[in-house]
Amino acid sequence: MLSGISIWQLLIILVIVVLLFGTSRLRSLGGDLGSALKSFRSAVREGDKEETSEDEAASGAIESTATTESDSASDTDKRKKSGGRKKSS
């Protein structure tokens, strides 16, 4: 696509843009674009942090459920081995 455009053609386009809009307008446009990108990046980082904390909370709930299920399964296995009677301590 851009292989047909030479550096001279790009310079001519740049000069035309500067003449049309002026340097102050281009400078403010660049600043606005930079601040928009900065806020977008920070929003993406915050979204990643929220997803990470939600994932950690969900995995903690799953682990506690799995632990409870394995504890009840081991109690059942103990009762089967002892002949179906639960020993009182």
Image (cartoon, helix red, strand yellow):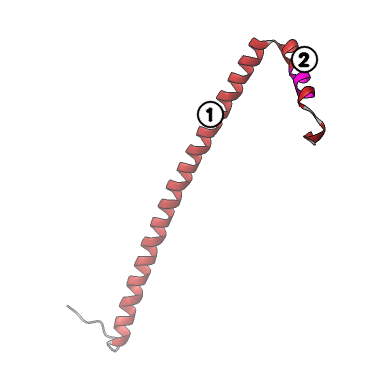
The part of the image, by quadrant, that contains residue 75 is bottom left
Q: Is residue 76 left or right of residue 55?
A: left
Percent of width and height locating residue 27: 62, 15
Classify the position of the N terminus by image quarter. Answer: top right
The answer to whether residue 47 is above or below residue 74 is above
Percent of width and height locating residue 35: 55, 24
Q: Which secondary structure lies at badge 2?
A: helix
Classify the position of the C terminus by image quarter. Answer: bottom left
Classify 10 Å Cα crowding around label 1: few (below 14), some (14-19), many (20 and above): few
Q: Disc 1 residue type?
A: Ser
Which badge, 2 or 1, comes first in the chain's sequence?
2
Classify 10 Å Cα crowding around label 2: few (below 14), some (14-19), many (20 and above): few
Q: Is residue 69 left or right of residue 51?
A: left
The answer to which of 38 and 60 lies nearer the viewer is 38
Please give the name of the residue rendered at 66% of the width and 15% of the height, measured from the top-left corner.
Answer: 26
- Residue to which mark 2 is pinned: 16
Please give the name of the residue rendered at 57% of the width and 29% of the height, measured from the top-left corner.
Answer: 37
Q: Which secondary structure lies at badge 1?
A: helix
Circle 2 or circle 1, nearest the eye: 2
Q: Disc 2 residue type?
A: Ile
Please give the name of the residue rendered at 62% of the width and 20% of the height, measured from the top-left corner.
Answer: 30
By secondary structure, the bulk of the magenta-drawn segment is best described as helix
- Measure the C-alpha gap from mark 2 to mark 1: 30 Å
The part of the image, by quadrant, that contains residue 3 is top right
Q: Is 16 covered by the magenta stretch?
A: no
Per the rendering, the mark at residue 81 is none
Q: Farthest residue in the right direction?
A: 4
Percent of width and height locating residue 31: 58, 19
Mark 2 and mark 1 in contact? Answer it, CB < 8 Å: no
> What segment is highlighted magenta in the picture?
9-14
Per the rendering, the mark at residue 39 is 1
The answer to whether residue 37 is above or below residue 24 is below
